Amino acid sequence: MGRTVPSITMSFEEEQAAFTRFRRALRRSDQLALDDLFATARQHLAAAAYASHALPFETFLLAMLLEEHKELLRLREELDAMQRRLRLPDG
């Protein structure tokens, strides 16, 4: 019989648990930021299941980076919109 491969969710939870001591050593504000990063990675577990060629943690890091980049793009768009409003004369 073949070997059972852990689900991506199980792999994610194992990776997150592996950082428990690291998390405890952080300041409270950094702990919350790390928790947010893991939460954003969790949103992409279905897609991560298709990245079987990569190491699971690499996939989780990419998911975190993806969410951070989406936030950056959203903030840039918001900043551009604010700058356009400031340039327009009051009508």
Image (cartoon, helix red, strand yellow):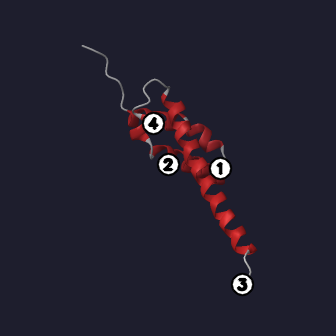
- Crowding at label 2, few (<14), some or many (≥20) Cα neighbours within 10 Å? few
The residue wearing badge 3 is 90
Of callouts 2 and 4, the N-terminal one: 4
- Crowding at label 3, few (<14), some or many (≥20) Cα neighbours within 10 Å? few
**Which of these two is toward me, 67 or 81?**
81
- Crowding at label 1, few (<14), some or many (≥20) Cα neighbours within 10 Å? few
Q: Quadrant of residue 49?
A: top left
Query: Residue 87: x, y in percent?
Result: 75, 73
The residue wearing badge 2 is 39
The label nearer to you, 1 versus 3, is: 3
Query: Residue 70: x, y in percent?
Result: 57, 51
The label nearer to you, 1 versus 2, is: 2
Secondary structure under the numbered disc 2 in the rendered image: helix
The residue wearing badge 1 is 30
Left or right, residue 5 beside residue 30: left
Callouts 3 and 2 close, C-beta under 8 Å: no
Quadrant of the rendering where the N terminus is positioned: top left
Query: Residue 22: x, y in percent?
Result: 61, 38
The answer to whether residue 86 is above or below residue 41 is below
Question: How far is disc 3 from disc 4 in space, using C-alphas?
Answer: 52 Å
